[in-house]
Image: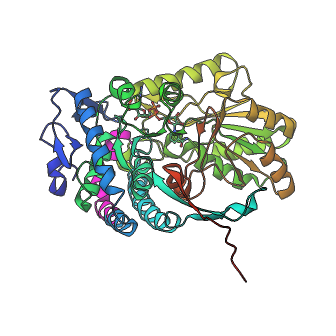
Amino acid sequence: MAGTGVFADIFDGDAYKYYSDGEWKKSSSGKTVAIINPTTRKTQYKVQACTQEEVNKVMELAKTAQKSWAKTPLWKRAELLHKAAAILKEHKAPIAECLVKEIAKPAKDSVTEVVRSGDLVSYCAEEGVRILGEGKFLVSDSFPGNERTKYCLTSKVPLGVILAIPPFNYPVNLAVSKIAPALIAGNSLVLKPPTQGAVSCLHMVHCFHLAGFPNGLISCVTGKGSEIGDFLTMHPGVNCISFTGGDTGIAISKKAGMIPLQMELGGKDACIVLEDADLDLVASNIIKGGFSYSGQRCTAVKVVLVMESVADALVEKVKAKVAKLTVGAPEDDSDITPVVSESSANFIEGLVKDAKEKGATFCQEYKREGNLIWPLLLDNVRPDMRIAWEEPFGPVLPVIRINSIEEGIHHCNASNFGLQGCVFTKDVNKAILISDAMETGTVQINSAPARGPDHFPFQGLKDSGIGSQGVTNSINMMTKIKTTVINLPTPSYTMG
Ligand code: NAP
């Protein structure tokens, strides 16, 4: 159970503690932040509201710990990560329990998130051993005017202190996707978990603690992003920020100093459906892509752009599948569970009302109880409706009927977002042309958008992000190239 057994140290009976210097502590602020269970809408957990002094302290410790961690052999760093991954998977049940209660993630998906996170940590350790163990050797005579008098050796060195800020929807997975690359590359790590999802993250961090990482190397400070976020992101001790979330990331990018940024932000992933598509396959993918975790996924299908000639048939198929979705509590493993907060539910409702006023066709009746919103397919959506452009982050999916492929591509590219997109057709040549024309970080052919598998490159264009994730890219992003040049007094050429 959460907060008991091996996790007893992280809880004081009332509130969860924060993690600094290898210990679980109560904040000197004497204040806590409440985490509201989205299903019951009552306080489920409390976490520490950390102070600026406590942030200063973890930054100082992280800086010191990183220096000796960078001198720890790569294989030893990997060994500890493998150990943490095993502990994480061993304790999947209490962590999944927190995910169910903090973010209303269906029970089975919550377990999957923890197991996937353990796998990611292990994969990252293996990948790090391979790619960080290699460098380059260059010689000077390949550049005009040079003799072979210089040997250049390149290697990858850590950046220093990485600040990791994940969002609520995959708090554990998107935290480890930053922690593991940072650590294998020889960096230290300060985690600021999302408030909804903080207790899941604290349990996950405890698994790293149990694995035996050095004190101060990993810290976890809790508190509302709106209160300590700016202090953290503008802290002079931070050498790199890896952030996943919404528009907050755009504001952080403008305020952060001259440090590398990895930003994975929102999306409005379009699903373009051509006349020759397998409509049963499309309908299943729209259900999986649009309604899994109640649409609260960065890569959810967020707008369907379907050719008019097959639109009626597709909408009927999707409607039939929507009717089969179960709606209820995450504990019961319902397909559709309450969205994360009342303000999120209100925002979604605002988009629905706007679509209603402007004449969208409701394929189901709009229904809401508290934070629980029944799945809703909106047909005949037009570009003047907010839902055509905005990210609902809820179980509401707009369908726009198009008369040409160009119209679909135009709608996709007119969005401020450019995370992923997908195209359904049996004509692979057309699919490639459309993929190339879509201004998104990834295009899936004949499948819904998805972030995984976690070693695939994952990136957003435009307001969807900066840089690229995926295990290999994240490790590389959290390093810098260092070169050493050996200068010879006379040219030296290798002989065959
Ligand atoms: P969010 O509101 O932007 O919050 C993300 C994180 O930022 C949370 O940890 C939040 O902490 C923190 N934060 C808030 N204000 C901050 C500030 N001023 N400075 C620093 N940190 C601050 O996003 P969300 O609602 O959790 O997640 C949903 C969004 O994430 C959606 O837009 C979704 O598309 C996007 N997302 C993108 C990806 C991707 O890989 N592209 C993946 C998943 C989700 P608090 O919780 O304490 O406010």
Residue 87 falls inside the magenta stretch: yes
Question: Residue 425's spot in the image, x, y percent?
Answer: 80, 53
| Render colour scheme | rainbow
Q: Which residue is the extreme one toward the bottom? A: 496
Residue name at image x 50 percent, y 65 percent: 127
Stretch of the chain drawn in magenta: 84-104
Q: Quadrant of residue 311?
A: top right
Q: Quadrant of ligand 1?
A: top left
Q: Which residue is the extreme one toward the top? A: 357
Tell me if residue 98 can be seen. Answer: no
Asked whether 415 or 29 is in front, the reply is: 29
Asked whether 375 or 470 is in front, the reply is: 470
On the rendered structure, is 150 left or right of 48?
A: right
Predominant secondary structure, magenta span:
helix
Question: Residue 58's spot in the image, x, y percent?
Answer: 26, 39
On the rendered structure, is 482 left or right of 53?
A: right
Tell me if residue 455 can be seen. Answer: yes
Question: Residue 274's spot in the image, x, y percent?
Answer: 82, 47
Residue name at image x 14 percent, y 49 percent: 9
On the rendered structure, is 135 left or right of 339?
A: right
Q: Quadrant of the C terminus?
A: bottom right
Residue name at image x 33 percent, y 27 percent: 228
282 versus 155 height, above or below: above
442 versus 226 height, above or below: below
